[in-house]
Amino acid sequence: MPSEGYSYETGKIPTFHAADYAVFGCTLGISAAIGVFYAIKDRNKQTTDDYLLAGRSMHPIPVAMSLLSSFISAITILGTPAEVYVYSTMYWWISVAFIITAIGAGHIFIPIFYNLGITSVFQYAEMRFGHPTRVLASITYLVWMMFYMAIVLYAPSLALNAVTGLSLWGSICAVSLVCTFYTALGGMKAVLWADTLQMMIVYGGMITMVAMGANLLGGIDEVWRTADEHGRIVFFEFNTDPRMRHSVWTVVFGGAVFWCCVFGTNQAQVQRAISVSSITRAKLAIWLNLPGMASIITISCLVGLVIFSFYAKARCDPVSFGIISKADQLVPLYTMDIMNEYHGLPGLLLSTIFSGSLSTISSGLNAVAAVMLEDFVKPMCCKGISPFRATIMSKIFVIVFGFVSLAFAFLVSQLGTMILTLAYVLFGVLGGPLLGMFSLGMLFPWANKWGGGIGLATSLALLLWIGLGQSITGTSVVIKPPVETVGCNWNATGFSRAETPINVTAAPGHTTTIDFAHPVTSAFDKYTGIERLYTVSYLWYSPIAVLVCVVVGLFVSLITGIEDTKKLNPKLICPAFDIFFPYLPEKIRKPLRFGVRHGEYLPEFDSLAERKERINSLTVNEAIPVVTANGSKAAGVDNRAYDPPQQTHL
C-alpha cells in the first residue's frame, strides 16, 4: 500500500516519477531505433514491394505478432478491462468468435488477395466492379483508418493525462511523431519487428497487472468470488434479442463478422498477411493469431476483474467518486494505485498502452500510404512511376497522414463514448460495408459492377444513418450494473455527500438495497418507432452492413443483368465448395462453381509477371499457346527458334 494511501482514500492520484518518464521514453526510443536500423540495412532496396510488403519474404511468426498487435491496441488494453468492470465478462466470447474469423479470413479473403499479387485490396474492387467502386471503397477506407488511428492516439493519451499528469497533447504528438518516424524510415519490416517487440511488452505488462493485483487481494479465486458476488461474472446470456448489448449470439456471430472486417479485408492486416513467401504461410499467420487473440482477451478480462475487485472491496467506484471521469481511465489509475511505490514500474506497465498505440498507428500509416499510392496516384496521374519515386512518395504519404491523424485526434476528443464501443461502431459503420462489397464479389459470381457499387453505397448510407442516429438521439436500452461509493473518502474531495456526481448509482450509506447478483441489464420497451432501429447492439452493425450490401447488390445485378460467370477471371471468385468440401465428388462440386472456370488454365487472365515467368520457363521445342481475341486457345506456335535470355519481348 502506498505510504499516502490509495486514491479512493486520499482523493488524489499518484503521478509519474522521473524513473517512470525515463522508462516510458526508452520504449518510444527503441521503436524509433528499429526504424533507423531497417532504413540503414535496406538502404539499397528502393522498391515499393520491399517498402510496403517487406519483399514478401517475412517469417509467419513476426507477421502473426504484427497482425495481433495491429488491432490489439490501446483500445483493447484500456477498453476491455473497462468493459468487464462496467458490465460483465460476456465480452470474453469475442475470443471464440475469432475461430469463425480465421476460417473466413484465412481461407476466403487472404488467398484471393495473395494469388492476385496485388498491393492494395482495392485493386480487387476495380477488377471485379470497376473504377468508381474502387474510388468509393478507397475513400471510405481512408476515412475509417484516419478516425481509427485518431481514437488509438487520443484515448490512451487522455487516460494517462488524467491519471499520471502526463501532458495530453504532448504525449499525442510524441507517439504520432515516433510512429511516423520509424514507419517512414523503415517501411514494413520496421513495422513488423516493432510490432513484435511491442506485443511482448503488452503481454508482460498485462500479466504483471493481474499477478500483482491478485496477490494483493488474496489470490485469483478471491478476485473471482468478489466479481461474481457483484454480478460481473456472466458467461451464459443466450437472449436472442438483437437489442441485447452482449449475448452469446451477439458477441460470437456479430463479433466474428466484425473481426472479418479487420483480418479479412482491412488493408493494414491484408498487407501484413501477404508479406510472407507463400499462401500456406499467409494462412498460418492468420491461424497463429487464434491463440494470441484468445490469450490477450482472456488476460484483458482478468485485468478488468482484478480492477473491479480491488475497488469493490474498498466499496468505492472511482468514476462515481470523481477521481476519474471515464471508465477508460481505470487501468492507469489502478496501475498508479498499486505500483506507485515501485519507481519505474508504472512507467514500464503503462508503456504497454502506448505500445499498443504505436503498433496500430504504424500499421495504419503504412496501409494508408499503400492505398494512396496504388489507388489514387498510380491510376490517376503516374502510371509509369519508377519504383524509387514510388517508394519516396509512400514515405511522404506516411509523414503527411501522420500529421493528419493529429487533426482527427482533435475531432475524437469531442466524442464521449467508451473507446471500445466507439471503435466497434466505427468498424461496423465503415468497415462493414467494405466487407460486404468484398463478400459480394468473391462469393457471388453473378454480381455485376452496378450491384457492387450500389450495394456498397446503400450499405454505407444505412449504417451511417443508424450510427449517427444513435449518437445524435442518445438512444440506449442498456442499464449499467450498480456500483458502490460508501467506502470513498468524500472528505478528501471537493464534493460533499449531498453534492456527489450524478452518475453515482448508490449514494453513500444506502447500499444495502442494491441487488448485485441480478442487476437490470436492459430496457427494451423504452423506445418506439424508428428509434427502435437505433437500439440494435453495436456488434450487429457489421453483419447488417454485409447483409444489406449483398442483398442490394444481388437485386441490382438481377435487374441490370447478371454477370456471365464463364467470362469471369476465376482468381476473383472464391471456390467455396472446393475449399470447404474437397472430398465431394467432382460431379457434385462442378455445378457448385456456378460456371466459374476454376482449375482451368486461362492465359487471358495471367498477370504480366505470370506471363514473364511462363515465357522464361519454356524449353526449346515447347509450343507456346496462343490465345485468340475471343479467348479460345489456338494451336501452339513452334518454339525452336526461341531464346528467352536474348529475345524476351512482351
Image (cartoon, rainbow, N blue to C red):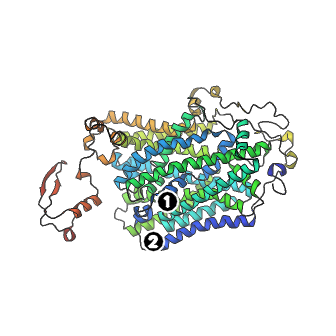
Across and down, in percent, residue 341 comes to 78, 60
Disc 1 + disc 2, Cβ < 8 Å: no
In this view, the residue in front, 209 or 173, is 209
Residue at 82% x, 41% y is 500
Across and down, in percent, residue 272 comes to 46, 56
Question: What SS does tag 1 mark?
Answer: helix
Crowding near the residue tagged with mark 2, few <14, some 14–19, many ≥20 C-alpha atoms within 10 Å: some
In this view, the residue in front, 96 or 550, is 96
The circle drawn on residue 62 is: 1
The kind of residue on which mark 1 rests is Pro
Q: Is residue 581 left or right of residue 567?
A: right
Q: Earlier in the sequence, mark 1 or mark 2?
A: 2
Against 372, residue 425 (above or below) is: above
Q: Is residue 51 left or right of residue 154?
A: left
Across and down, in percent, residue 79 comes to 63, 47
Residue 414 appearing in the image: no
Crowding near the residue tagged with mark 1, few <14, some 14–19, many ≥20 C-alpha atoms within 10 Å: many
Across and down, in percent, residue 626 comes to 16, 55
Q: Is residue 65 left or right of residue 20?
A: left
Question: Depth-wise, is mark 1 or mark 2 nearer the camera?
Answer: 1
Based on the displayed image, in which of its 4 quarters is residue 336 positioned? bottom right
Name the residue tied to disc 2.
42
In the rendered image, the quadrant that contains the C terminus is bottom left
In this view, the residue in front, 208 or 311, is 208
Q: Is residue 231 left or right of residue 9?
A: left
Residue at 49% x, 48% y is 262
Residue at 61% x, 53% y is 74
Question: What SS does tag 2 mark?
Answer: loop
